[in-house]
Amino acid sequence: MKEFSKVAMVAAFLSTAVSAGALHAQTAEVLHWWTSGGEQAALGEVRKAFEAQGGTWVDTPIAGGGNARAAAVNRMLGGDPAAVFQFSIGQQLRELADQGLLANVDQIATEEHWDDKLPPLIVKAAKYDGEYIAAPINIHGENWMFYNKEAFEKAGVDVPKTWPEFMTAAKKLQDAGIIPIGLGGQPWQERIMFNSVLLGVGGRDFYAKLYSTLDDDLLASDTMREVFETFAKLKPFVDESSPGRNWNEATNMVIKGDAAVQFMGDWAKGEIIAAGVEPGTTVGCSLAPAKDTAYIMTVDAFAFSAMDGQDPTPAQAKMAHVMLEPDVQIAFNKKKGSIPARLDVPSDSFDACAQLAIKTLQDEKTHLVSTGLFGVPSAVSGAIDDSISNFWNSADMSAAEGQEQFRQAISYAK
Ligand code: GAL
């Protein structure tokens, strides 16, 4: 082989190796559970921005939040971590940091002054030992009621503002041949509806005190009994095909008018938008019936597996930067159904429901946290979901028995 062609070959090999190395340095595997239409559309905005800035995105979608979170943790424990994984900020993410499983993105956060751009509640929950361990990307609210306006008109009902009003409306909807509540019969969905009843019946101070203290007397209180009695009254308003249904299928029932309402987080709005419906038109949005105005928040975030100690790789640092960019915050959240995590992002282009969320959150007294991943330890979160689901799916458990098994489950888990 001529000397020249050998040199050419070596040069070609080296340039490939270097570009592969460069490619690898900007390559991030992203493990997440955003598999519905709206979720995919929203995440696509982040991917587009990451790739436009030289990143290579390796997509690892796993349906079901619980499945995806378990996969992310198992991969880390098994020594084959996904560089970036979806979680939500709060107590459960801090449990992973406690085990040394996470890299931190504090350098990026400090350079970009995240402390000044995020709500204090999010700043606190996204940190571990004073350093950012996640990139918070939005604020979702769980205590929403999405409703089909035509179904309400057909049954001659107005938007219910209290749970007693809802019961009256639900009976009229049922008599009109409409399934009153479109529900996905899975523990986390049943818990979301339960917590809207708890907030609505007990009030925001009761909700905040109960879940921040897990106090036995509150768990055994008359107020808690009334919550279980009210929750039990919803059972006849759900169709028999509810068990196992995915949340976005229930959303689709409301979009089509097969069901009148869905009590769900506003990621349901992402499906409504993906279906080509402007939220607030044929499908309306209202906070779930309650005597207090409040917002049960869950904050989606992406965390970063410790690939080489606690320092992020260049790709992880780039991902954290991209997720908090104002343009990405707008493009992602408008499709996700949530509102930006950043306070300094113009929101005038957001839909009417998002505007209600932003207005509500201006009063800090409305700030409540989800028991899903945010506000309680994972063992307690699991106990809450399981005991509520046991009660919801039991044909003969009384409200008193439901309350007592809820109290016991939490007492053992805390
Ligand atoms: C939640 C998450 C939402 C949405 C929902 C249903 O945990 O915060 O963004 O993905 O799960 O998948």
Image: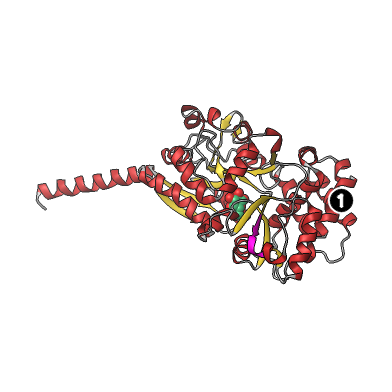
The image quadrant that residue 185 belongs to is bottom right
Q: Which residue is mark 1?
A: 226
- Residue 318 can be seen, yes or no: yes
Count of labels shown?
1
Q: Quadrant of the C terminus?
A: top right
Residue 21, horizontal then vertical, whole percent: 33, 44
> In the rendering, at what x and y percent does residue 40 appear?
49, 55
Left or right position of 274 against 314? right
Q: Identify which residue, 221 or 86, lies in the foreground.
A: 221
Name which residue lies at 55% across and 28% down. Answer: 115
Q: Secondary structure at mark 1?
A: helix
Task: Please check the rendered image and state whether residue 148 is part of the magenta-colored stretch, yes or no.
Answer: yes
Q: Is 379 on the left-hand or right-hand side of 361?
A: right
Q: Amino acid at mark 1?
A: Glu
Residue at x-position 50% and y-position 51%: 335
The one of 236 and 41 positioned closer to us in this rendering: 236
| Percent coordinates x, y for residue 246 in the rendering | 63, 62
Q: Quadrant of residue 54?
A: top left
Residues packed near mark 1 inside 10 Å, few (<14), some (14 to 19) or many (20 plus): some
Q: Which residues are magenta?
A: 146-151
Measuring from the top left, give residue 354's x and y in whole percent: 58, 45
Tell me: residue 385, above or below residue 246: above
Q: Is residue 236 magenta?
A: no
Name the residue: 38% across, 43% down.
26
The colour mode here is secondary structure
Identity of the residue drawn at 90% across and 55% down? 400
- Disc 1 CB within 8 Å of nearest ligand 1 atom: no
